[in-house]
Image (cartoon, coloured by chain):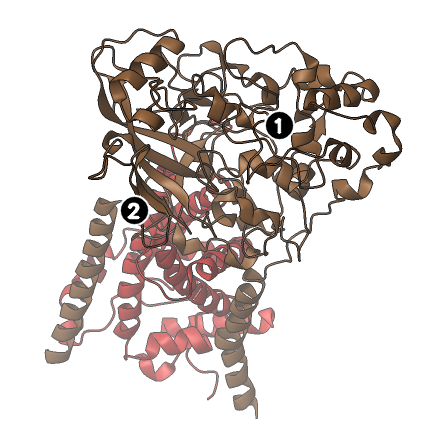
Amino acid sequence: MRKTGLYLYSKFERFWHWTQMLLVTLMVITGFEVHGSFKLLGYENSVRIHSASAWTFMGLALLSIFWMFVTRQYVNFIPSRANLKEQINYYMSGIFKGEVHPIRKSLFNKLNPLQKLVYFGLLIFIFPVQIFTGIAYMYYHYPQNPIDAKGFEIAVYTHTLGAFMVVAFIIVHVYMITTGNTIATNLRAMISGYEKEEDHEPKVENKENQENNIVNESNEA
Amino acid sequence: MKNFFEKFISLFIALLLPMLVVFLTIYFGIQRDEPHKAEIELKADRTKKSDHSEFKVLQQNFTNPKQVTAACISCHNQRDEQIMKTPHWTWEREHKLLGTGKVTKIGKKNIHNNFCTGAVGNNGSCMRCHIGYGWEDKNFDFNDPTNVDCLVCHDKTGTYFKQKSMAGWPATTETADEEFKVPDYNYISQNVGASGRENCGVCHFHGGGGNNVKHGDLEQELVNTTKKVDVHMAAEGTNMTCIDCHTTKDHNIMGRSYSVSAENTNRIYCSDCHTNTPHNDKVLDYHTRKIACQTCHIPVYAKKNATSMYWDWSVAGRKDENGGKIKEYDADHNYSYLSIKGHFVFDNNVIPEYKWFNGTANHFLPGDKYSELPVKINELGGKYADSTSQIWPVKVHRGKQAFDPVSKEILSVKLFAHKQGEGAFWEDLDWEEAIRQGMEYNEREWSGKYEFIATEATWPINHMVSEKENSLKCTQCHTREGSRLAGLTDFYLPGRDYSKWIDYFGFFIIIISLIGVITHATFRIIR
């Protein structure tokens, strides 16, 4: 395979994504075992793995925040109204008619407006809430001492609610993988970093982007 | 070649490296360090011994145990004064009661108990376990040092016994029988030493009328036991005796029994030897903030012989067709019915109940009027919101006792007398007369009416610590069905508790997501 196509996901991003995917899956499984929903790994193992995964997750999160600001990739996650309607229309009807994606991806615009909205919510709201309540869960077991926080429940219930949100996200997210130009486009891109050329209708502006990307890649290497 | 290299990089970045990270996370996550070991030097190994057989004063011709006491004090200067200040002698201590906050003298001398109901007025039988000679009635002299029985706690020959029904006296030439001989005071007094398990056990194992009846975690088995029953006292283990934990200064023995006391003082803690972080593991050590060690490490009590769980006095007094007293046994040969005591339920290998406990207690004293049922003969203080409370395993002893329906007080009953016709229930099986005399002796008013009422007493469990392999497992509490802590509902327990509504809502959004995804996929396929 030649390095053709659009380079979207750097090595770090791919590593971040898949590690996060494994950790989140692990935390969902162990978390719901601790919640009492089923028995699988054993309660004690679940507690220990859940906590350990949480620490790795937080370490990874710090690393990714650092990376995002150094590479300015955080701009990808800032929600924007532009093309939001088009994107919704595409998923509601265009996709069934075989129309082309309304958004052209590029290194600094690799997410569509809906993705931006959802990922932003995940990164800015759900994850921090899970981290905050999770730390409370680990270290503030007995909220009467020293400060009376009126019980452990608030943290626990919020954490549980967040966990359900994450599961719902996973379901939709896994499905959305298949909505690229071909069924495998998105998955392949997250593995190799490239969105393949044959998946695109070549356009001049895209080629420019592509060149930029390759330059960027060699810089990084 | 380059192609292969690129594929490998992709594989490494997207699969191998993440898997390595997760593997390391799990690997180090489930590591558990070895728990800390506690060190103990046994009291027996650090006590200086002197050969008492050399002492002239112990070679005299003793005719009375009080002479032995006098001989002891002649060398052991002031020991009499020390012991006469302790509850082993006074059978009471001034404590602040939980609830009312009333400061009052409580102890075996005046409290109701949930077994033989109360000591005062039944001195002949009950005061056998007083460390004195002849607390027969109200005339007993608490200020006479020669009334102190040194031998019952310090005999090392195993031949000294207080005789049954003799208010603390050993057998004399007049009273000696098959079971109780006149003690050989020269032999015994020349072989004294620090109290052993048998010395403590003669009363603390046999309270309530038989082995293990009262405590449930203190019984004859502990004299020579296995690690399975008690990891501390097992002969093949640490071989600790009572006084290795119940240390003593000036004859004041550490330790608290909340059946007779109410304050958070003079207590012994596991952490005295084991520290507050004995597991060397964060998750487990966090538990010690709110869970007493005993909760996980004493998963069952009464591991050998059965203990009394239920004692119903209301059916006592039944006679057989010849007017004789009845004894009935259950399948395990424990009493199930006695005419003189009523109906019992005994059980062994009992799973404890669990309560919040902060080292304080309330007691239902003579003169107190009940307002709720069952009457709590004693009640432990504590709740989740109290930062000093821990969850403790307890034996809850339930039963029925005689009460006055007019005054709503528990009645004092005369149970014991040496012979029939003196109004004692155990002799004559006559409630009216037994209550009349019991109330009169205790200087209490009685309306003349009596009924029976549900009562319960709570005993924290401290002994019979199991080996670590047999301690409670996480899911014996952290589970939705059958949690051992099902009765403690004033806090959120992970694994046991959850919000029904949050779960409904959560499953709702999961189902909505699935339906949305499936519908969308279907339209894409059939377009």
Q: Which residue is drawn at 53% across and 16% down?
A: B92
Q: In this view, does B41 lie to the left or right of B438?
A: right
Q: Which residue is drawn at 41% across and 22% down?
A: B417
Q: How crowded is mark 1: few (under 14 residues within 10 Å), some or many (20 or more)?
A: some
Question: How far across and how far down the image is residue A214, in percent?
Answer: 51, 74
Q: Give the brown chain's letter.
A: B
In the rendered image, is residue B371 in sight? no
In the rendered image, is residue A192 in sight? yes
The amino acid type, in three-letter code, at marker 1 is: Thr
Tag 1 secondary structure: loop
Q: Is residue A160 above or below residue B151?
A: below
Q: Give the red chain's letter.
A: A
In the depicted view, which residue is nearer to us: B156 or A94? B156
| Figure quadrant of the N terminus of chain B | bottom right
Q: In this view, does B495 lie above or below A3?
A: above
| Image disc number at residue B75 | none
**N-terminal label among 2 and 1:** 1
| Figure quadrant of the C terminus of chain B | bottom left
Q: Name the quadrant containing residue A104.
A: bottom left
Residue for badge 1 = B172
Discs 2/1, front: 1
